[in-house]
Image (cartoon, rainbow, N blue to C red):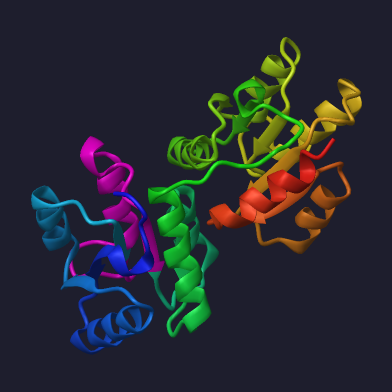
Amino acid sequence: MANIEISNLAILLVEPSTTQLKLIQRSLQDAGVRSVDGVGSGKKALEIMEKFTPDLVASTMYLPDMTATELVRAMRETKRLYDIPFMLISSETEFKALDPVRQAGVVAILPKPFGREELRRALRSTVELLEPHELELSHLDLNDVRVLVVDDSSTSRHYIKKVLTNMGISNINTAENGLKAAAMLSLDDYDLIVTDLNMPEMDGLQLIEYVRQRLGNLEVPIVMVTSEQDDTRLANVEHSGVSAMCNKPFDPQSVREILARVMRP
């Protein structure tokens, strides 16, 4: 679609509570969305998606037949549904419950109740994914920028890669943990490293220390994208030589601003 706006979005809302469904539909309409279809189960949502592809799926965490985590995983396992943006709307606060959804590459996790600006930010992120805009770097040709994305979640790697590709960066390599990334970095130079924190074999903090200390590379920008909530671990990352940090899920516009800043000459 060309010139996508929030008002053009076709949203599939998955919410078993009739009252909550109407409230969220009203909030979406107040935000400018014209097309919102509501269903009450994950199975019904998947059946509808077999017939037409929505621009965004918004779901509560707990459905009668599955969780939002199971729903988004089912979408990610289906080629035609793989890239549909997904947004969670839930009062759930437990890290263990939310982290699998974060790792699936979602545009936003909104609390119940959510604020108007939180909703609009999530909708703008959806528009950004559907109608990307190139990153503007006056001193660099995006075709020459080499990026290494490091994350143990394949869906998260795909999502980050998609966001970067939408910005005009095409030369992107990936690694599933810090150890494999370290091996790649010992052989090739990169202009940007985007890494997760919690990974097996070598985590993001150890990878940063490897780059800054073992390789002695103090120049390459390293952006940490993580769902970590432990303040001590995050403080250690901040002092490790990381160039910037952002949370999962992240706003593509925020990533654009971060990259424009950290990749200045």
Left or right of 113: which side holds 61? left
Residue 113, position in %: x, y? 44, 85
The magenta stretch spans which residues?
A: 59-88
Between 187 and 227, which is closer to the camera in this rendering? 187
| Quadrant of res 87 | bottom left
| Percent coordinates x, y for residue 36 in the rendering | 22, 72
- The residue most toward the top is 187
Residue 66 in the magenta stretch? The answer is yes
> Residue, x 33% and y 50% (percent of image)?
2
Name the residue located 80 percent from the left edge and 48 percent from the top edge: 237
- Direction from residue 38 to residue 141 in the image, left or right: right
Instruction: In this rendered view, identify the residue nearer to me: 231 or 39.
Output: 39
Q: Measuring from the top left, give residue 111's x and y in whole percent.
A: 47, 77
Q: Is residue 248 visible?
A: no
Q: Is residue 96 above or below residue 34?
A: above
Q: Is residue 99 above or below residue 135?
A: below
Residue 109, placed above or below residue 156: below
183 drawn magenta: no
Q: Position of residue 215 (x, y in %)?
A: 86, 20
Q: Quadrant of residue 174?
A: top right
Question: Is 84 situated left or right of 203 in this image?
Answer: left
Q: If the image is split into quadrants, where does the C terminus sit? A: top right
Q: Residue at x 13, y 52 (%)?
A: 52
Q: Which residue is painted at 27% across and 55% down in the image?
A: 71
Q: Residue 175: in sight, yes or no? A: yes
